[in-house]
Amino acid sequence: MSLVFAAAIVALLSMVQHYVPGVTLLLAVPVLLGWIVWDHGGWILALGLFAFLSMFRNPLIYLWCRVRGDQPEVPS
């Protein structure tokens, strides 16, 4: 639940201020999803993973393009 509030607060920041809190949330998600699956099981993990992919779709698409060797366009 705290990840949702943290992501909502980060979403209110300007694009220039997104980098540090956004990366922090991106790195914290695997730990939090592991904790969710430990406490609640796979179905709740699926919901949490869906929410994570929804919130971080653009950075993940960018990283996927970089892994494939493409040069993705970065919005200004």
Image (cartoon, helix red, strand yellow):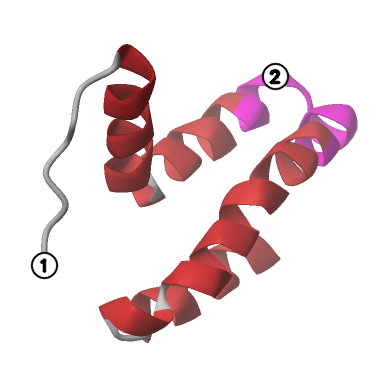
Q: Which mark is residue 8?
A: none
**Residue 18 occupies which quadrant of the picture?**
bottom left
11 relative position to 34: left or right: left
How packed mark 2 is, by other alpha carbons closer than 10 Å (few <14, some 14-19, many 20 or more), is few
**Residue 63 occupies which quadrant of the picture?**
top left
Q: Depth check: 7 or 69 in front? A: 69
In percent of the image, x 20 and y 22: which residue is there?
A: 70
Q: Depth check: 72 or 27 in front? A: 72
Q: Label 1 belongs to which residue?
A: 76
**Residue 51 occupies which quadrant of the picture?**
top left
**Looking at the picture, which amino acid does disc 1 mark?**
Ser
In percent of the image, x 28 and y 77: which residue is there?
A: 15
How packed mark 1 is, by other alpha carbons closer than 10 Å (few <14, some 14-19, many 20 or more), is few
SS class, disc 2: helix
Question: Please, which residue is most extreme toward the top here?
Answer: 68
In percent of the image, x 45 and y 76: which residue is there?
A: 10
43 relative position to 50: left or right: right
In the picture shown, does residue 31 fall above or below 55? above
Q: Are marks 2 and 1 in contact (CB under 8 Å)?
A: no
Q: How far, Cα to Cα, is label 2 from label 1? A: 39 Å
Query: Is residue 74 found inside the magenta-colored segment of the image?
Result: no
Q: Position of residue 33 (x, y in %)?
A: 71, 37
Q: Which mark is residue 42?
A: 2
Q: Position of residue 7 (x, y in %)?
A: 49, 67
Q: Which residues are magenta?
A: 35-45
In percent of the image, x 56 and y 25: which residue is there?
A: 46
Q: Position of residue 42 (x, y in %)?
A: 70, 19
33 relative position to 12: left or right: right
Whether residue 11 is visible to the viewer of this picture, yes or no, is yes
Image quarter in which the N terminus is found: bottom right
